[in-house]
Image: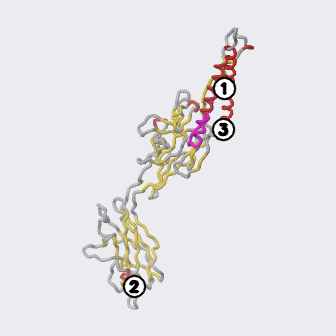
């Protein structure tokens, strides 16, 4: 019996060393959870066995139990690098249409070519859908959706009105050359305004200011002409009698004409397929003894917003920000927990699957109902303590050596008995 008792000890020590080696091999694996071997002694007894004379029959491995203590927190700065501070797992699916949920503590997420937020294994991060105010509108496993980042936000609005409040220099000289937008000596000042066509594409409107009349004793008024171009197209209020807009100022520098916005004839910007009709308003402009300046500039068009950034708060709300100033709530990160996490089945790559031992997943939101909070810009590393594992490895090695010695001693005793001659 001593052979088998020592053999069980050898096997137990070998299994413990294998488990420790696995822990040490994954010391740098994000989201990894170490395991610990639990042993039990083997006792064979019966009703007639004297309890004071029982001899054990060795050792057996009861369980290799996973340890779900929090791992080291590693700062990355990535907006989609997430960590659960406390209890809970991220829920993922292999594809959009998959029904199988997997669970992980590795929150290093990225965006795939289809704009889905995925982990290193390609699993889609699961979130609860939300409405425009950010309120969750679904619950349970059936309500989960894969988080996908939108490419754009909003609807393009073509520009129909442009407002410029400018200050023109009262001491500016009258250009002697005929106006030519390619000749800077033929105009006094210019300014550019970005407007938008029917599809939301930005186009540049350039306004050239030419002084055409200086004040005299007989006529103290001043006049300026404004030549407006979009690309190579000159904008005119009356195509039948094309002429630039004329601004008239009184002796005090106040603009007296025009008193209302000037409506340009429809035109089609280069690269656009639809006409654009723009009204130009110079109300509020003045002529003063100061350099040319644009005081205010506005236009009522807008482009489609392009995704600029994404952020995740402590409650798991995912917010996207777009170039047009829009912000959009995309979903709330779903967390899962189990009544017995040590019963989860390891799938590798820091993945787990539910089993009958772990119990069914309890789904919820970060910071509620016993779930941990979320932190962004951080990932959870392995919870393996190298020093602790090396000490355990030394102890396991000593146990192996002791059982080997016991097995060798039993072998020598048997050999001695075999060598006895009658």
Q: Which label's residue is closer to the chain start, 1 or 3? A: 3
Between label 1 and label 2, give the one nearer the viewer: 1
**Which mark identifies residue 221?**
2
User: Mark 2 or mark 1, which is nearer the start of the sequence?
Assistant: 2
Left or right: 402, with 34 as reference point: right
Residue 404 in percent (x, y) is at 66, 26
Q: CA distance from mark 2 to mark 3?
A: 93 Å
In the displayed structure image, the side of residue 293 where residue 394 appears, left or right: right
Q: In the depicted view, which residue is nearer to us: 119 or 273? A: 119
Where disc 2 sits, the SS reads loop
Q: Is residue 106 visible?
A: yes
> What residue did someone put label 3 on?
390
Q: The N terminus lies in which quarter of the figure? A: top right
- Relative placement, left or right, of 49 versus 267 is right
Residue extending furthest toward the front: 421
Depth check, mark 2 against mark 3: the one in front is: 3
Residue for badge 1: 404
Relative vertical location of residue 41 with respect to residue 231 in this rendering, above or below: above
């Amino acid at each position: 019996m001593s052979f088998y008792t020592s053999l069980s000890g050898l096997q137990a020590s070998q299994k413990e060393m294998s488990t420790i080696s696995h822990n040490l091999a994954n010391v740098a694996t994000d989201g990894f959870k170490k395991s610990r071997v639990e042993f039990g002694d083997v006792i064979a007894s019966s009703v007639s066995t004297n309890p004071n004379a029982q001899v054990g029959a060795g050792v057996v491995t009861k369980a290799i139990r996973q340890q779900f203590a929090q791992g080291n927190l590693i700062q990355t700065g990535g907006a989609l690098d997430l960590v659960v501070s406390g209890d809970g797992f991220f829920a993922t699916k292999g594809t959009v249409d998959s029904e199988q949920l997997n669970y992980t503590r590795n929150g290093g997420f990225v965006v795939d070519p289809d704009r889905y937020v995925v982990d290193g294994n390609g699993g889609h991060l699961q979130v609860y859908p939300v409405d425009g105010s950010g309120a969750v509108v679904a619950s349970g496993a059936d309500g989960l959706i894969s988080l996908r980042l939108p490419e754009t936000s909003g609807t393009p609005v073509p520009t129909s009105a442009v407002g410029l409040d400018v200050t023109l220099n009262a001491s500016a000289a009258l250009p002697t050359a005929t106006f030519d937008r390619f000749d800077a000596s033929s105009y006094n000042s210019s300014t550019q305004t970005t407007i938008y066509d029917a599809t939301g594409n930005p186009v540049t409107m350039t306004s050239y200011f030419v002084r055409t009349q200086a004040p005299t004793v007989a006529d103290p008024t001043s006049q300026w002409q404004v030549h407006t171009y979009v690309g190579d197209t000159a904008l005119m209020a009356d195509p039948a009698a094309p002429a630039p807009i004329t601004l008239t100022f009184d002796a005090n520098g106040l603009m007296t004409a025009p008193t209302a916005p000037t409506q340009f004839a429809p035109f089609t910007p280069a690269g656009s397929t639809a006409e654009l009709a723009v009204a130009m308003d110079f109300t509020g402009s003045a002529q003063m003894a100061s350099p040319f300046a644009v005081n205010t500039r506005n236009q009522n068009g807008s482009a489609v917003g392009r995704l600029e950034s994404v952020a995740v708060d402590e409650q798991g709300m995912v917010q996207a920000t777009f170039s047009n100033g829009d912000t959009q709530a995309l979903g709330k990160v779903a967390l899962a927990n189990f009544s017995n996490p040590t019963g989860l089945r390891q799938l590798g790559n820091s993945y787990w699957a539910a089993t009958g031992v772990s119990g069914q997943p309890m789904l919820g939101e970060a910071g509620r109902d016993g779930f941990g909070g979320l932190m962004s810009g951080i990932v959870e590393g392995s919870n393996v303590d190298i020093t602790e594992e090396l000490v355990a490895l030394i102890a396991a090695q000593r146990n192996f050596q002791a059982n080997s010695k016991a097995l060798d001693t039993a072998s020598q005793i048997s050999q001695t008995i075999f060598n006895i001659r009658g």
